């Protein structure tokens, strides 16, 4: 039996997330109810926490990096069994507009994202349309499966920017996504793969995750990147920080024919100077990419299930729902935690 109420982490105002007893979501005929096991705290959740995103949606249950099992299904749902391990494409688009038809659901003007525009998975249960589900291998450790959404972002970014084998790639910024992007670059055979970051500890993590070189951001960093890329600058630079100064550096690290991958999210309205002279003379280009959608989730699931990423460092911090406020605080302030995961089956209890 599905209980009428459930425990959930509710963002009531910026910088305030509390555990509350709320109504269990009701599902429509085409939806399923998922019993959540784990949900990871993402950079997007931090933006919601800081009042940058979804301010008009509060109070909101955030959480979109989830894995769980099907607990109930609407009467039109076919092909899914209660108890199956699943995640869902969080981008619920209309499916029929010109962008959806071109497999660009993120551009759909009527899109609603689970955990961003509507209630998400920092709760015992989350609702999702059956058409958005992805079936997962129940043998794979579930904490790894929470990384499918972030990996789907890497999948889409690499496809849209065309990064392929033997191309040089600089990843600027070694947060949770930066380290995944380094691993993705290695996976597609990019060479060399260079991490550029502000902290030595981050560079060590990147090297341990497969980066060929690590460059400390600061004096001489651009020259160092040039030296590592035959004096030319890199074929691709992925900015994964979202700051004006790191975008400026990223542009300068880019070589002839290079492509800037705009991944890090700056605040809306914030601008950065761009030397288009170089873009023209060096035939450079730019691709924006922010999330995974549709088949990116399928591909991300395969990569995670077949251990194509080393995700061991991403499950070092797992907290029960009761400690979600601490979890957000650590995700914001503790740079040593690559990822904070909330355990939704462990409602009460001490931090692990
Ligand atoms: Zn995410
Ligand atoms: Zn659409």
Image (tube, rainbow, N blue to C red):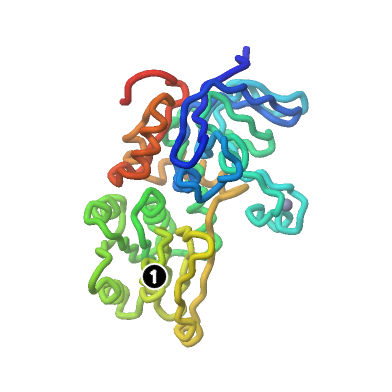
At which x and y percent is residue 268?
53, 60
Residue sitting at the far front: 13
Question: Residue, x 46% and y 77% (percent of image)?
Answer: 274
Disc 1 within 8 angstroms of ligand 1 (CB):
no
Question: Residue, x 66% and y 57% (percent of image)?
Answer: 107
Q: Is residue 311 visible?
A: no
Number of numbered discs: 1
In the image, residue 285 sits, relative to residue 39, either above or below, namely: below
Q: Is mark 1 on a helix, strand or loop?
A: helix
| Quarter of the rendering occupied by the N terminus | top right
At which x and y percent is residue 322?
41, 24
At which x and y percent is residue 259?
47, 72
Residue at mark 1: 250
In the image, residue 141 sits, relative to residue 226, either above or below, namely: above
* 105, 229: nearer the viewer: 105
In the image, residue 19 sits, relative to residue 111, either above or below, namely: above
Position of residue 96 in the picture relative to residue 178 (left or right): right
| Quarter of the rendering occupied by the C terminus | top left
Quarter-of-image position of residue 79? top right
* 277, 61: nearer the viewer: 61
Question: Residue, x 23% and y 72% (percent of image)?
Answer: 219
Query: Neighbour class for label 1 at 10 Å: few (<14), some, many (≥20)?
Result: many
At which x and y percent is residue 214?
26, 62
Quarter-of-image position of residue 27? top right
Q: Can residue 232 be seen in this view?
A: yes
């Amino acid at each position: 039996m599905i209980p009428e109420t459930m425990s959930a982490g509710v963002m009531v105002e910026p910088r305030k997330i509390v555990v509350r007893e709320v109504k269990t979501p009701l599902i429509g005929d085409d939806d399923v109810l998922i019993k959540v096991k784990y949900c990871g705290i993402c950079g997007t959740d931090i933006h919601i926490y800081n009042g940058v995103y979804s301010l008009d949606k509060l109070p909101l249950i955030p959480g979109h990096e989830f894995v769980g099992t099907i607990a109930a299904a609407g009467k039109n749902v076919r092909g899914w069994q209660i108890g199956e391990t699943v995640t869902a494409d969080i981008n619920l688009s209309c499916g029929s507009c010109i962008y959806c038809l071109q497999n660009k659901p993120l551009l759909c003007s009527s899109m609603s994202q689970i955990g961003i525009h509507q209630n998400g998975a920092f709760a015992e249960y989350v609702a999702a349309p059956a058409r958005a589900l992805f079936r997962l291998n129940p043998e794979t450790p579930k904490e790894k499966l929470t990384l499918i959404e972030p990996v789907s972002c890497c999948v889409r970014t690499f496809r849209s920017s065309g990064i392929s084998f033997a191309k040089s790639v600089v990843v600027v910024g070694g947060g949770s996504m930066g380290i995944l992007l380094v691993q993705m670059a290695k996976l597609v055979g990019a060479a060399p793969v260079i991490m550029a970051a502000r902290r030595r500890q981050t560079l060590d993590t990147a090297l341990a995750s497969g980066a060929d070189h690590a460059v400390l951001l600061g004096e001489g960093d651009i020259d160092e990147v040039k030296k590592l890329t035959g004096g030319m600058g890199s074929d691709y630079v992925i900015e994964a920080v979202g700051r004006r100064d790191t975008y400026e550096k990223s542009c300068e690290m880019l070589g002839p024919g290079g492509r800037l991958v705009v991944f890090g999210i700056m605040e809306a309205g914030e601008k950065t100077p761009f030397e288009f002279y170089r873009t023209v003379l060096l035939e450079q280009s730019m691709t924006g990419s922010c999330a995974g959608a549709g088949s990116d989730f399928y591909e991300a699931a395969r990569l995670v299930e077949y251990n194509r990423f080393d995700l061991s460092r991403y499950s070092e911090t797992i907290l029960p729902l009761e400690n979600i406020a601490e979890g957000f605080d650590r995700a914001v302030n503790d740079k040593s935690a690559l990822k904070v995961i909330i355990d939704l089956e462990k409602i009460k209890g001490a931090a692990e």
